[in-house]
Image (tube, grey):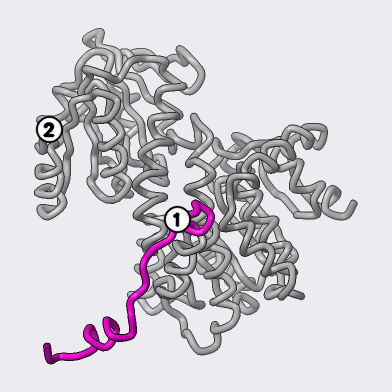
Amino acid sequence: MTMVSESIVKDMSLAPSGHLKIDWVKEHMPVLNRIRERFEKEKPFAGLKVAISLHLEAKTAYLAKVIQAGGAEVTITGSNPLSTQDDVCAALVEDGIRVFAKYNPAPAEYKEHLIKTLETRPDLIIDDGGDLVTILHSERRDLLAQIRGGAEETTTGILRLKALEKEGKLEFPMVAVNDAFCKYLFDNRYGTGQSVWDGINRTTNLVVAGKTVVVVGYGWCGKGVAMRAKGLGAKVIVTEVDAIKAVEAYMDGFEVMPMSEAAKHGDYFVTVTGNRDVIRKEHFEVMKDGAILSNAGHFDVEVNKVELEALSKSKRTVRKDIEEFVMTDGRKLYLLAEGRLVNLAAGDGHPAEIMDMTFALQAVSLEYVNKNYQSIGKRVLNVPYELDEMVARYKLEALGIGIDKLTEEQKAYLDSWVE
């Protein structure tokens, strides 16, 4: 019962519900199951401590159990206050994993959970948004010495890591899992595309067909959100700061314009940039009555909530995860999930089959760092292609799909400079 006494969770009596959720996703994560089988035999993390900060729901819980099956002592916390599921936390504690997480903690409590996770003195970390890395490189440098390295889940986290690396301040190697093919092609595009609209639709219970959706940012997540909006029957406008991505959005069939213009037309707004204040005062001032604002970037800074509230004469919660802001001219703007990740704060996140590939990458990337941390150096590195390709191959095998192989003659032809 050590993990129960050490953990901080809301209510251990919720564990049965959490076990059911974890059992469900396990049945739909064949790639991770295959990796777990190998981990159980080889124990690549035997004697090591692993700290995880991710959106703490069932799919993440199963990743933690796979790492545990590899011999690790695992401690986990949430990476977003509104995405933590209390029943899943309780279930993990019963399974021998230390948990510091509750749904919707106060900001100080949320920070405390992150620090307590690091105070277990892990050898390896899995991070989401760079919270663990930032704490280790600032206020808790005393915990750095034992860290061998880790893996990062998100675009936002990788931006922070590369900033550290550029300044020569990164103290251990980190694998940029977000930049792997099996992450951004499937998780960012198809996972975000589906889960964002799952969250918006279940929260608002309003029709999308015929409406105008403004997608702010046309990276892989933006591509997925725009594609799914189009499939739901919406007219889609894309805003961008990158000329190449703007041309791509145009050729994908979407309208492209600056936010100053798009703000006048949108019924729904979805931000997916990883940057701050991409929807702000001058945009709120010209939006239509009833416009719905949501964010799918890691931090709740993309929609400027301070300026939104300053422009309003009243604010109230009108439905679970929907705040209504009444402007001084009577227009009403609606913000979903406090401007946090709408697909997780107001939904269940990406589908299990999608996270199967992403979390398989996390597991094998962590194994790779552990084997090679002494030679890698203090830098941000990409997922080795052979690991990326292995995850794709496992996925195809799980789907019962076969593909061709090059003949020896074809290999020789491709390696030759003569015809």
Relative to 314, is 53 on the left or the right?
right
Marks 2/1 in contact by CB < 8 Å: the verdict is: no
Q: Could you say which quadrant of the image residue 140 lies in? A: bottom right
Q: Position of residue 44 (x, y in %)?
A: 68, 75
Q: Is residue 294 above or below residue 154?
A: above
| Residue type at tag 1 | Ile
Residue at horizontal 51 percent and vertical 66 percent from the top: 151
Mark carried by residue 401: 1
Residue located beneath label 2 in the image = 260
Residue range corresponding to the magenta coloring: 395-419
Mark carried by residue 88: none
* Residue 22 within the segment the image draws in magenta: no
Q: Could you say which quadrant of the image residue 11 lies in? A: top right
Q: Nearer the viewer, residue 403 or 364?
A: 403
* Mark 2 nearby-residue class (10 Å; few <14, some 14–19, many ≥20): some
Q: Position of residue 158 (x, y in %)?
A: 39, 62
Mark 2 or 1: the one toward you: 1
Q: Position of residue 127 (x, y in %)?
A: 53, 59
Residue 110 visible here:
no
Residue 281 visible here:
yes
- Residue found farthest to the right: 1
Residue at horizontal 17 percent and vertical 40 percent from the top: 239
Q: Is residue 160 above or below residue 306?
A: below
Q: Is residue 269 above or below residue 328?
A: below
Q: Could you say which quadrant of the image residue 336 lies in? A: top left
* Residue 416 within the segment the image draws in magenta: yes
Relative to 133, is 17 on the left or the right?
right
| Residue type at tag 2 | Ser
Q: Secondary structure at mark 2?
A: helix
